[in-house]
Image (cartoon, grey):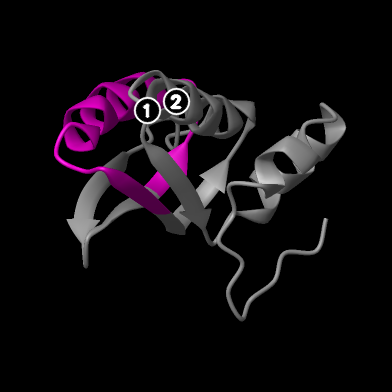
Amino acid sequence: MNAKTSSCAELSIVDDSISVSGVLNFETVPALMKQAEQLFKNQQQVSVDLAGVTDSNSAGLALLLEMLRTIKSQNKSINFKNLPKQIAIVASAYGIDSELDSFLNIQSNSQDY
């Protein structure tokens, strides 16, 4: 292991959207989900912008799926913007990319996966 074993990530509210930034991995995702649950309470329509994600593994996909589950249980709606390519690749590998597509807000930067 090298000195770069520590990761950080954060959620913030930017223009009525939840902005996710940093590294999404098994170290950072549990705390992010707890924070997201608190942020969801104040929003009826949840928009999650992932443009600030610098790296991700399958834990990033797990975060999005848990967000979906939580929002559905609250009878609210959610959409994701700027899905990182790493998450799209993992979703495709697990065969759930088409399910995730219905929650994507595809803007001018369409995803290719």
Residue range corresponding to the magenta coloring: 22-48
Q: Report whether 68 appears left or right of 93.
A: left
Residue at image point 51% right, 32% down: 2
Q: CA gap, disc 2 to disc 1?
A: 5 Å
Q: Is residue 51 above or below residue 8?
A: below
Location of residue 14 by image quarter: bottom left
Q: In front here: 2 or 14? A: 14
Mark 2 touching mark 1, by CB under 8 A?
yes
Residue at image point 37% right, 27% down: 75
| Residue found at the very far front of the displayed protein | 75
Q: Amino acid at mark 1?
A: Asn
User: Secondary structure beneath disc 1?
Assistant: loop
Q: Report the disc number at residue 75.
A: 1
Position in image of residue 72 (x %, y %): 44, 25
Position in image of residue 96 (x %, y %): 77, 31
User: Secondary structure beneath disc 2?
Assistant: helix
Tell me, yes or no, whether the highlighted magenta stretch contains residue 3: no
Q: Amino acid at mark 2?
A: Lys
At label 1, counting other C-alpha atoms closer than 10 Å, the crowd grade (few under 14, some 14-19, many 20 or more) is: few
Identify the residue under disc 2: 72
